[in-house]
Each structure stands twice: as C-alpha cells, then as structure tokens.
Amino acid sequence: MRALLSARWVTLGVLCLVIAALPLVFPSSYYYRVAALVWISAIAAVGLNILMGYAGQVSLGHAGFLGIGAYAVAIGPARFGLNSWLCILLGALLSAALAWLVGRTILRLRGHYLAIATLGFGFLIALVLANEARWTGGPDGTPVARVSVAGFRLAGPVTWYWLSGALLALGTALALNLEDSSVGRALRALHDSEIAAALAGIDVARCKLWAFIIAAVYASVAGSMLALFDGFVTPDVASFLRSIDLVAMVVVGGIGSSAGSILGAGLLVTLPQFLTVFAEYEQIALGLIIMLVMIFLRRGIVPTAQQLFAPRRR
Amino acid sequence: MAEFLQFCFSGLTVGSVYALVALGFTVIYNASNVVNFAQGEFVMLGGMVTVALLAASVPLPVAGVAAVFVAALVGLALHRLAIEPARGSSPVELIIITIGASIFIRGVAQVVFDKQFHKLPAFSGDAPIHMLGATILPQSLWVLGGAGAIVIGLHLFSEHTLVGKAAAATAANRLAARLAGIDTTAIVSLSFALAGAVGAVAGILITPITLTSYNAGTLLALKGFAAGMLGGMGKPLGAVLGGLLLGLAEAFGAGYVSSAYKDGIAFIVILVVLLSLPQGLLGKHSAERV
Amino acid sequence: MTKRFRLLPLLAAGAALTVATAAGERAVAQDIKIGSVLSATGPASFLGAPEEKTLRLYVDTINAEGGILGKKLVLVVYDDGGDPSKARTFAGRLVDEDRVTAMVGGTTSGTSLAMAPIFEDARVPFISLAGAVEIIEPVRKYVFKTPHTDRMACEKIFGDLKARGLVKIGMISGTDAFGKSMREQCLKVADKYGVTILADESYSAQDSDMTPQLTNIKNTPGIQAVVNPGFGQGPAIVTRDYRQIGVAVPLYESHGVASKSYIQLAGPAADGVRLPAAALLVAEQLPKDDAQRPVVVGYKQTYEKATGEPVSTFGGHAYDGLFILVDAMKRAGGADPTKVRDEIEKTTHFTGTGGMFNMSPTDHLGLDLSAFRMLEIRNGDWYLAQGDR
Amino acid sequence: MTLLVAENVGIRFGGVRAVENVSFAVQAGHIFSIIGPNGAGKTTLFNVLSGIYRPDSGRVLLAGEDVTGMPPHRLAAKGIARTFQNLQIFYGMTVVENVMVGRHLREDRRIVPSMLGLPSAARQNRATRQKAREILAFVGLGDPADEPAGSLPYGALRRLEIARALALEPRLLLLDEPAAGCNPVETAELGELVRSIVRQGVTIMLVEHDMRFVMQISDRLLVLDGGRTLAEGSAAALRQNPEVIAAYLGRHGAREANPALS
C-alpha cells in the first residue's frame, strides 16, 4: 500500500520538478513554446489514457473534443462576450454532455468497431467546425481573444509554459488518484474482463461512459489551452490525424501509464523539431522512429523501462 | 429519374473505389487480426509506381504488373520487418506500427516520386456511357469489375487451394494451425504480400478516376477501413457491400441533402448500421465464452 | 507492478527537450538570415514544393552573385505539413531561435493567419504566400503577401461574366480553406457585378466524383455559367465530370489551378475553361513591350531548367516575395527587421511574376485587378482570353 | 429457507436448445451441485443465473424476488457472486487489487472525491485493501498479495477468483469447476475452503467434474443431460437412481462415485 501511494507521489513529484527545473536550461523563449505545447498535448494524452489505458477502450476521434474546447474559447468571447475562463468551463461541460450522449450508444461497440464509430464521431465534429463558417470562420480558422487576469494580459510562451505546466500537474494528480480508487480499479478490471467485472458488481456501461466523459473533459481543456496559447484556431485541431497523434502519444509512452502518456506527448511534439535536420527525409525518419519504438520498446517506453529496472517483476 | 440514376452511378463509382481499398484490409485482417493503416499506401504505390514507369516509357501493362510486384514486396517487408518482430503486441500497438509504416512509406514516396498530382489514362477511353439520361465513365465499370474479380479470386483461393485453406485455419486459430503443422508466419507474410498486391491493383484501377499523389493513401485508408467495418471486418463480400453502401450514402447525401455534409452523412450511416448490427453487415455475432 | 521507476523516463524527457533544437542551422554573424515555414508535405504540398524549390534556387543564385550588400543570404526552411499549430511553433523558432530578419512563407491561409501574431509580436516582417484576403485585411503592421487575393479572383471572373452577359451562375466550391474562403468572397462581391448565384454546391478536397453536385447545378433552371473555386486535384475532377454529364454552359476555374498539372489531369475536358491567373502562365505570349515579360520569361526559364518541372504561379509568389524582400533590404542598407519592414511597405513599381506591386501603409499586397489576366485553355495550353487586354 | 428458485428455465442459441425446462430450488446454507456430461448445459445455466444470458423462458427467483434477466452487476448487488471455468483474472493488476475490485459495491463510487484524492478516499482505499488482505489470507493467498496476478500458479488463480467473489460478501456463490486442473491435495484443500465458506453462511452452487469431490461435499445435486433435468436429489439418492447411473455415473463417474459414497 505504501509503495503504491509513494509511487503516485514520485511520479507527480518528478513531473513538478521537471516543470520547475526545465526553464533553467532554456536558452530562448522558443523552448518555452515547445514545452508549453508538450504540456498541453500531455493533458489530452493523460486524459485519453484514462479511457484507453485504464478502461481499454479505443477512441480514434478524440481530437473532436480538443476542437470543442478550442472553439469554445474562440467563439464564446468573440460572439457572446463571455469570459475566456468561463468558456474553458463551458467547453468542458459541452464536451462532457456530448460524450455522455454519444458514449451511451457507441460504447456498446467493441474493439475495432468502437474505433470506427469514434473515428466517425470525431470526423463529424471536424466537419461541422469546417463547414459552419459563420460561427467558426471555416477552414481558414478564427482568431482567439487573449485572456487576462486582473488586467494583466496573458500572452507569451513563458506565461503559458507555467500555466499549462500547472494544469498538467493537476490533471496528472487527478488521473493518478483515479487510478487507485474504486472507479479506477473498476475501469482497469473491465479492461481485462468485462464479464468478471460485471459479476463483481461493476456497472460496466456506466464505468466506460465515465471514462469517456473524463477523457473528453481533459481533451476539451487541453483544446482550450491550445487555442488560447496559439491565439488562433483552425478545424485541423479536430482532425483525424490529430486524433491519431493523441493515440500514438498514449501508446508510444506506454498504455496505462500516466507518466508514459506525458513522455509520449513529449516525444511526438518535440520529434518534428528535432527532425528538421533531415529536411526532406523528415517523414521517413518520423515513421521509422515510431515503428522502432513500438517494436523494440514493447508496451511503450515507460513499461519497458520499468521492466528493465525491476527485472524480478514479471 | 435521370437524376436518381446519376446519383446511383456516382455512388457506385466512388463505392467501388472504397470497396477495392477495403478488400486489402480484409486480406490482412483475416490472416492476422491486424488492422493495417498502411493499406492506403499500398494503393498509392500501385498508382504512383505505374505513373512513374509510364513516364519512363514502359508500356502500361508491364508498368502495372511491376507496380503490383513492388507493392507486394513492400507488404512482405512490412510484415517481416515491422509486424512479425512485434508479435504479441496488442491490437492498438500494432495499429500504431502500421501508422508509423504509412508515414514512412509516404515519406519515401515523396522523395522517390514528387508531390504533384498524377493520373493514368482510362483503360477504355474517356467517353461516358449514356443510360436513361445518366452517364457513367467506362473506368467505373473496370473498378466495379475489379472488385468483383478480387472477391471471387479470394473466395476461390481460400476454398480451393491448400495455401488458402491454411490461411483460413491460421485466421481461425493461430496456435491450432501451428500445431497442425502450418507455417503460420509464412501464411501471414503471404497475406501481407497479397494485401499489397490487391492494394496495388486497386491503385492502378482507380487512379484514372481518383488521380493520385504520394499523399493519396491517407484518406483512402480511412474510407476503406470504414467500408470494411461497415461490411463486417474480414468478409470480402462485406467489404464490397460496405464500400458500395458508403459510396451511395455519400452520393445521395451530396445529391439530395447537402454536399457540404455528405461525408458526415456517410459516417452517420455507418454509426446507425453498427448500432443495429454491432459486427457490421455480414459479420457473425460471436457469443462470448466464459 | 509497482511504479517506482517513473523518474528516469521523465528525466529523459527533460533532457530531450533541452537539446530539442540544438540542430538549427548556424550562420556566421554577418550573414543575413531569412526564414520560411512552408507546407512542403501534407495536402498543400503541391503548393509548398514549388515555393521551396524557388526560394532555394534563387537564394543560391543571389549568393553565387555575391549576396546582398556584401553579405550572404542564409535560408532557414521548416515544413509545417499544413498544420497551423505546427506552423506557429516553427514561426516561434524562426523568431526566437534563428533570429531571422524576415520570413517569406506561409503556404496556406490557415498557417499564415496562425503565424501572423507571432511576427507581429516579434516585429519581424512576414511576407505570406497564401491567398486569403484576411491576411492583409485589416492591415497588420508586419504582415504582407504576394498572391492575388481570392476576392480579386472573384472580381476578375465576375467582370468577365458580366462582359459576356452571363450573370446567372452556379458555384461548386472545395470545402478546403482555399475554396471555402474564395466562395465567401465571391458571395460578397456578386452584387457589385450584378451576378446572381442560383446554385451553391461544394465538395471535399479529395473527393473522386462530383457528378451529384454537378447534376444538381445542371438541373437548376437558368444557369448561364459555373464557377469552381478550388485548388489541388478537385478542380480537375470537377472539370472531367462537368464534361461527363454534359453541362453545356461555360466553366470558370480559379487561380488555384494555375499550373500545368491541372491541364494534364483534366485532359481534353479542360478545353474552353477560363480562369484568372498571373501573366506567368502565358509568359511567351505577352507582347514584347509588356513590362512583365522579362521577369516572367526569366523566372519561367530558370525554374523549368533547374527543376525539370513546368512552372506554376505558386512558385512565382515565392519569387515575388523573396525579391520584394531583397529590394527592401537593399534600400534599407541592412538587415534590421524594422527598417526592412518600412522599406517593404514602400515597395512601388516592383514588377514580379504576379504583376506590378505598389504597396502602401493601407495596402500590404499592392496588386490591382490588372495583375490578373483572363486565360482560356485551348488544345491543352493557356491562351489570353479574347477581350482581355 | 429457499434462497434460489429456478422455474422452467430454458435458453436456446440459434436452433440449439442449450437448457430446456429446468427447475430446481436451492436451500440457504446448502451446497448445491450441478453435474452432467460435457455440453449438458451446466455453464450455460450458471450464465443464466448470473445474468450473462437472459433466459428465453422461465423465471429465476432470488429470496422470492424475480431476478430473471437482471444484468450481472445488479445481480451482484443482490448477492450473487461467481467464479469462472475459464479463468477471468484481471491480469493487469496485483493479486490484492483483484480482490479489491470485488469490494466495488461496498465502496463509495463517486468520481469526484476519488479524483481529488480526498482523505475519505484514502481512508476507504486503506479499508478496502485491509479487507482484501483478510480475504486473501482466508483463501490461503496472504503472501503473494502484492505480486502481479499473472505470476500466480494455476491453482492459486482459482483461489484468487474465489477470494474476489467472496469480497462481494455474497449470499450465493456460484463456483464453476473450481477443482479443474487441481491435484488431489489441492482438491482436498479446496473442499475445506468450500466448507468453511458455507460455515460463514454463504450458499454455494457448484459445477464440477470431479465426482469424488462433488459427491462428498454436496447437500443436493442436479443432474443435467442435453440441457434437460435428468434427476435431482441427495448424493445417496442419486447413487440409487438407475437412470442416473445408466446415463451418467455409469459411464463417467461410477468408479469414483461409489467409493466416495461408501
């Protein structure tokens, strides 16, 4: 018990330490920018890991919720004069409501059939965002109003680095708490055997729905952060490729591990920055790295590292 | 009436394209339960290699056969170098590997070929066939016929050849098949090569209609995957049915409802079908054993 | 399984981040750095690729001829894959890390609009290569662009339609950023030219059959012409299907298909299609006294010789952007971004592939309708349409 | 007191009648076993009783309440727990966590307090873990509690399933072939365990092939053949039943059954 409890705090402690210490070695604000993007992507990945890693349900349309969060902070302030912070909340509520509505039906599907249903759902959201140009600005996108706190305008990578870093730490703490709770165990149980979970008194459908809703809220908040940070948003934020990116973050880092999701986000966000040296061979290198990680680091980076350092474990 | 028929023809044209792509998914899924997101790249390779060879003055039939061989080799390599070493990984991990592979193949294609759009000449000319006031391009019939021929070919292969039966056994139960003396690894390799070849044939047939570029595979994979799931994964006939239904949904959606939302309409059709038939149109309902 | 060993991977992540960008191109202090974020891969790569080739080609040429003001030009190119968020990150990198003097790039309107605030904040001039009028309207102090706006394309087409007395039209637009944005602009300026839009259809960028939409247009009574705002492969398929179902009225394409590849893809179906485009496409047909002739013939021949590909107006926009910047730097007598910006704004009588640029504090494009020629495709080649000039 | 009653229960798959017109009653505190050859419908019947399958006909009453077709998680709340012939272990978890899952219904299942990690959530976790350890000790798995479940040997996994089921504090425990794959010593230990569970007031239903084990332990037995009831009664009565001997015991278990009863 104490081992598990402390493991939770170790993950969180290391994360906070990294967030706090990284700026010491950052030579320019560009690094803050990339790191802020990592934190924001990691928020969505940690959330998706609750659905994919804990509950074992695949979503290939999760960027749809990123889109809802992003456009909430774009449209709310511009069209309705709402406060941006309030809009993050409204976006999250809208995402939760939509996840509840959609999840009730499609979470009955299994495996690849669930994958295609979620893919279709994400596709629909991206389609609406691109088509309803009067509201969303269409495929060209729309600017997002800057937010301010007590008259102080929040702009610039440094501010957003700290803001998104803090939010990621919070989101990770919540996810780790959930993992070691009644509901968290229920999710991990139904991942392995839905029937045994049901017979242990777990309302499988309800638990899956909760995981879907929680993951949607994480993604929505991340989407809002991304839009506010970028100051501009296009429907690409909800695209299929973005959904695939999120899934890849979770899987490459190590499915089921929050630390893995953060690491996966770090890898996939920073890789394109590294790979610019390859110029036109960039895509080749990216594809190769993804394949090699998945082939040689079975189960993802974090679980492989755990096995390496704890050989007596199975 | 003419309008309705035109929408039908459009749906059949587009649907048979999706069906051809979905057939490639089916081949690999059947032998190994892997959903291969690089299937669209096989289709792209079929088109682009043929285009490139044609540009080098190779006659079309020779170029086509060469493209099929190239794609089959790439399929084989994909299995041997990326899927087989990762055996035992979960389905979603394998999907990520195939996505990595698709990025890789695309990356190579953009360097080897170029980033422009290309087309192939239609096999039987561009003069549309008129029928009751509607028109269809002869190439659409080639695509439709190609899908039919592949379904029949796959059926004959799995029912009437020893290798095909071994593949069916491998699909049903890999361990049991191995105990029965079947080299299951070779069978799965073969299925990847076959899927590469099927994809390339698809690419050659559809390029006169859809055009192609190094980037064409992504969307085709998406639609082909959707069509395969709609039909019931692993069923060649289901893949064709799913593809045609998807194409018709898009055509009638564009014609009668809203062209801006036609892709959305297609996905709504998929959702409705799956919610009433959770294993797709032709999928078997398997009761869970405990 | 315990979770004790999460420490190391996280540390590794931190280390990875810190060296993330150690690989930027290193330039000598005296060199002048120019940045470029382009969509060299992804759905807009057929635009980004010629842009990148053009920039690399001419930067090499300039350096071979001794550089600018005795200094070498260093070009830093990043590929955003068409993703605005990625473009923005690279824009930040150009500004914060590479410390470029100016940026010529931004293949799509989406990426350009996403990057604009960064260059505004950093006070670095940014010459966009994308179409949307929103990039320069309202005017942003540091943001310029070289391609004709989609509104100008609409006006050019509608002007031609009005002259031919074809004022009841159908539109079929791509749902991509280019098609959608141009459609909006066309709807806005239609009244000004007395054009009525009777049918308004759309298609997705990678659709392979547009006959349902075209059937609906064909069956709309009173249609006199059809306009197709779109780029990439879509317009080629629209053109083919247009002939397939036998729509008899004239078809207008946009400047988004102004490359030879459109004619190749659409084949004989493209015959008779009209479109507004820069003079570049008809370089050799221009009258000997046309001021643009030397520039466009020169660019066309240089590009085609170096790359072996037919020239497109997309690469031309990059050419214009690069040389507007080079001229401005020469006039500024150095590479100070603010001074360069001031000089870019003062660009007048600059003859590029796109036309004659006359910029001002209120006009960060500087082209007027005369920059567009109305072209007609005949026998697989471009010709100046009758009545144009 | 009668805890569970099945009335004319029947279920078919496609054209096959897996279970047909089966009726029986289980007294509280008894060990009630279902025996029969492979394919007799034993596990199918368990699946109906535990809510995995919905019967096409008939009723199931639990303590007088009609629970026919109720989903598994609600039946669990009513006090039915079970184990599986094909093990359904949560391999992604440790041994003790597997059992903690069984405490699900006894825990506060609200999301927000769990995610916030409130002191109440931590307290509950401690309590659940403590209880799970006690149950593990009861089934003899106290030592490997913090190991991954997958590291246990086969026999221990069967006990782990029992522990998880017991964690529900059920009224009725369905054990589906608990002795399968166990050696004689393990089987004997299992018998002890089953008896001690009954002593705690839990009623047990058992599907088992090991006739010696079944005959020794059961208060009452139901014999199924081809989905139909062949006979029902005490072990002694069944041993006298010529039909049962002919149809089942005679073929499969007479040699074991007879010494077991003598």
Image: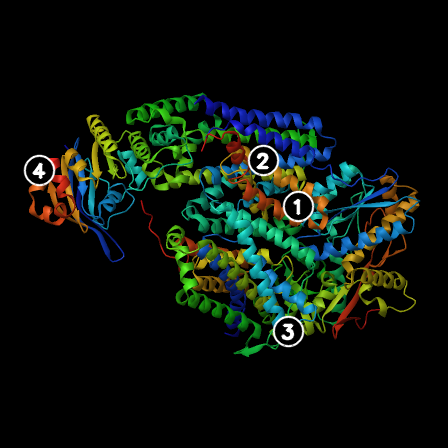
Which residue corresponds to mark 3?
C243
Q: Position of residue D9 (x, y in %)?
A: 19, 47
The quadrant of the rendering that contains the C terminus of chain A is top left
Q: Nearer the viewer, residue B232 or A80?
A: B232
Query: Could you give the CA–CA distance between mark 2 and mark 1, rounded to whole angstroms?
Result: 31 Å
Residue D236: numbered disc: 4
The N terminus of chain A sits in image quarter: top left
Q: Chain of mark 3?
A: C
Q: What's under tag 2, amino acid-wise?
A: Leu
Distance, label 2 to label 4, CA atoms, is 65 Å
State whether residue B146 is above or below residue C192: below
Q: Residue A263's mark? A: 2
Q: Hey, what amino acid is under mark 1?
A: Thr
Residue D158 located left or right of residue D195: right
Query: Label 2 vs label 3: CA separation?
Result: 54 Å
| Same chain? Circles 2 and 3 | no
* Nearest to viewer (mark 3 / mark 1): 3
Residue beneath label 1, please? A142
